[in-house]
Image (cartoon, rainbow, N blue to C red):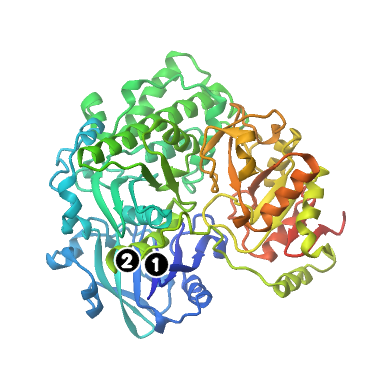
Amino acid sequence: MNIVGLHFGHDGAVCVLKNGQMSAYISREREGREKHAWAFTTNELNLALSRSDLTVRDIDFFAITSTQGMALSLGLIENFDIKLKSHARHSMFKNPLYDLDMNVESLLSKDDWTKGKVKTMGWLDRYGIASCWSPRGATIKEIAAVNCSSLLKTESIRYGFHYPVTVEISGREIPGCFIDHHVAHAASSFFLSGFEQAAIVTHDGIGSEDVSKLHELPYNSGMIYYGYKNYIIPLQPHYLFLGSLYTLISLGVGLATQRDLISGSGKLMGLAPYGRPVFFRNEFVGNAYDYERKFGNRDMTHVWRSHMEGMLSALKYPMNMLAKPEHMTESTNADVAASTQKLFEECLLEVVKATHSMLLNSGILEGSLCLSGGTALNCPANTRIHKETPFSSIFITPACSDDGLAIGAAAYLCHQLLGYPRQLQPESFSPYTGKTYSDKEIFLAIQEFGSSIVAKNVGYNAAEEAANDLACNRVIAWFEGGSEIGPRALGHRSILANPTYSENWKRVNLIKSREWWRPFAPSVLEEDMADWFDGIPNHSPYMLYTARVKSRRLPAITHVDGTARVQTVTPSSGRFYDLICEFKKRTGVPVILNTSFNGPGEPIVETPQQAIAFLVKSTLLDALYVGEYRLTRCSD
């Protein structure tokens, strides 16, 4: 069974599942070198099929999803179209929405962001609504009191978040399905988690901007689900629009732009520890319907922003520093960030606790939790969920934002609709999904740069040589195997430095042309994690939790509040694990500074050519390790 997942929204991608296993994942961002690129092209689709040893003739199903409200850019793909019609193979699974003979045309999202450039079509953004979802909306306390046991066996809900379509490609008609955005988020986490059953909470950065549509699209910002074996069952929308709030506050303090709203959220998270949450009040903890009852306005962003503007004025903060890069860590900006981060954490904690209560009300005693959606990249919030909620096991996929939707859509069709058996080994999924380059390909890439670089073949001693460089306080880039999925560097496309030298914080920020105040993450051998960090799960392979740093020997990765975003490393990370082991032999420290291998506004490098080009133009990077070679600039 060959299923191709297609994500047409921002961070567009193509995924191929062969018999339930991911055989290829191609991100348009990495291929086209445009950060958070929309949709995908013929190039990405062909690459995914080629790496899976498939052709169009071998595809059994397409699973199609997109960012909420965004049209599908069909014109970027040659000989490709989607028709709202059934296919004989749709009889392989239940289609309750299709059976209702709905007027789907009236429900299609028809955003025209590509109007006049490429052919587009709408996609289905509105799916089933259960009778227990109050038409007037539910506060968080009301969600916690819900008994949703009746939904566990209701097929119209269990199967009510897909719609059958037919894909026409290169003269073939292939069955496909539109897959709801948030159920794809849920599937990207639960079906990769190894949990037989789990609570699932999705929450992302963009919800409905038109509050009049909250009744119409009650699940648009996220959902609460229950995952059991091959099923993901939508239980309740949580009406939490904090993702949008967080994004817009990052814009307000000058960390995001209208052109790139997405990247500002990570910066706001990094800025928050410089400030104090002085604007936070418990009365602001709640979802859209809590806000409606407390403040007469469901627009959480408007209410929160007005509150902070009033406090800034009343407390006489110097407003000439607001959104000014040179004053970013001053209290005017930092206290806004800290207060917003505090609100984000408290609201999300309440929703997760309400999820646990709702399951208990429904007769389900569940200790496992899956998180997904772009806001699951918020490390401090994840850490508090780990420490302060009843869930004992938590899984978050490294591609929890929209870059994982192609995987989730394909997995949902594969397991939920077609019933294909799941792999239940804990975290059998590997994040290193990119292409692996052969020695010959790497050698040819080196030759392209001629006399501008010096190449030394270090063979299988690359880890030892790199550890020597780090021990001597050189900053290096490390390029190994296939690139990692998601936005975080996990040791295959990384810039590395010695964490025991405080000046390396500033030094690496200069190499990446980042703001001086932005922190860096440590990668630590998992077997040594507890000796150096605490407050997070001992297994934290994807940099999704914030730990307390126990040692003063790590100034380059210790943030101003004494924390760090930790990646634990095991042999499954390849030679990156060997590198840290060798660094430990030389220094006694099983920790290195690890950040993504990219320049400002760029995606993480994907190819050897991109890695070498970075080295050539960066006068502050000491060396690059790629395959069996140590490379330096000729002028060095």
Q: Position of residue 50 (x, y in %)?
A: 52, 77
Q: Within the image, what quadrant is residue 388 found in? A: top left
Q: Judge by depth and name the residue closer to the eye, 135 or 158.
A: 158
Q: Are marks 2 and 1 in contact (CB under 8 Å)?
A: yes
Q: Residue at x 69, y 49 (%)?
A: 495
Q: Position of residue 536 (x, y in %)?
A: 52, 36
Q: From the viewer's perspective, is residue 56 above or below residue 511?
A: below
In 3D space, how far apart are the residues under numbered discs 2 and 1 (Cα atoms)? 9 Å
Of all residues, the one furthest to the right in this rendering is 635
Q: From the viewer's perspective, is residue 88 above or below residue 189?
A: below
Q: For mark 2, what is the residue?
A: 413
Q: Nearer the viewer, mark 2 or mark 1?
A: 2
> Hey, what amino acid is under mark 1?
Gly
Q: From the viewer's perspective, is residue 125 above or below residue 278?
A: below
Q: Judge by depth and name the residue closer to the eye, 10 or 199.
A: 199
For the C terminus, the image quarter is: bottom right
Q: Counting other residues with Cα less than 10 Å from the Cα at mark 2, is it few (<14), some (14-19), or many (20 or more)? A: many
Is residue 398 visible from the viewing direction of this image?
Answer: yes
Q: Position of residue 623 (x, y in %)?
A: 79, 54
> Hey, what amino acid is under mark 2?
Leu
Of all residues, the one furthest to the top in this rendering is 315
Locate residue 565 relative to residue 163 in the image: left or right: right
Q: Residue at x 72, y 64 (%)?
A: 627
Locate residue 380 relative to residue 556 in the image: left or right: left
Q: Position of residue 522 (x, y in %)?
A: 64, 41
For the N terminus, the image quarter is: bottom left
Q: For mark 1, what is the residue?
A: 5
